[in-house]
Amino acid sequence: MYHIKTIEGQLDSKGLKIAFVAGRFNDIIVDRLVGGAVDYLARHGCEKENMTLIKVPGAFEIPVVTKKLAESGKYDGIVVLGAVIRGATPHFDYVCNECAKGVAQVSLDNDLPIGFGLLTCDTIDQAVERAGSKAGNKGVEAASAMLETVRVMQQI
């Protein structure tokens, strides 16, 4: 259409080594995100023996563990998954912001695609909707974004 070379990522995860970092807080929601992400990558060719799940206490701990995984050089991509639900204090804002900033910095510092599947919801109902209900499964979307980015970066 544009008559220029176009690079796009193929949605084929065969042969890739993928890590998932998942917060245990709000695990009823997070488990659904993990299930969606793992299923998506398996359906796109990733062998289960090439997938590793690391569970951390909550969203605030996700960046430091993601950093350690990225620096190990063992993984082609990482998917981070968690759920933070707004409460009555500003704690929500600090946790969400620091997790997002930390994960983005790890990705940039290590040239490593990281799918960001941290739900930041005002209510538990919103979280349920985004973990496989009316609004789809954001774990699947995070895995898909990571996979496509891995394949794009391999072509650059």
Image (cartoon, rainbow, N blue to C red):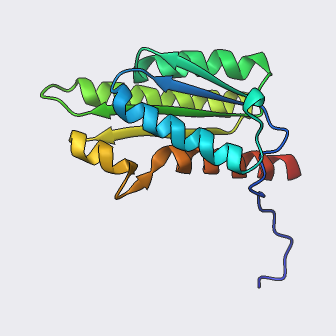
Q: Position of residue 61 (x, y in %)?
A: 46, 16
- Quadrant in the picture for residue 93: top left
Residue beneath the point at 77% across and 29% down: 50
In-front residue for pair 59/13: 13
Relative vertical location of residue 66 with respect to residue 96 in this rendering, above or below: above
Task: Report the side of 102 relative to 136 (left or right).
Answer: right
Residue beneath the point at 42% across and 26% down: 98
Q: Position of residue 143 (x, y in %)?
A: 61, 44
Task: Report the side of 57 relative to 21 (left or right).
Answer: left
Relative vertical location of residue 3 with respect to residue 43 in this rendering, above or below: below
- Could you tell me how many numbered marks the image carries? 0
Relative vertical location of residue 64 with respect to residue 109 in this rendering, above or below: above
Q: Residue furthest left?
A: 88
Residue beneath the point at 66% across and 15% down: 68
Q: Position of residue 20 (x, y in %)?
A: 60, 29
In-front residue for pair 4/30: 30
In-front residue for pair 58/24: 24
Whether residue 37 is visible to the viewer of this picture, yes or no, is yes
Whether residue 156 is visible to the viewer of this picture, yes or no, is no
Task: Report the side of 119 relative to 61 (left or right).
Answer: left
Residue beneath the point at 52% across and 38% down: 35
Q: Where's the N terminus, which quadrant?
A: bottom right
Q: Position of residue 144 (x, y in %)?
A: 63, 50
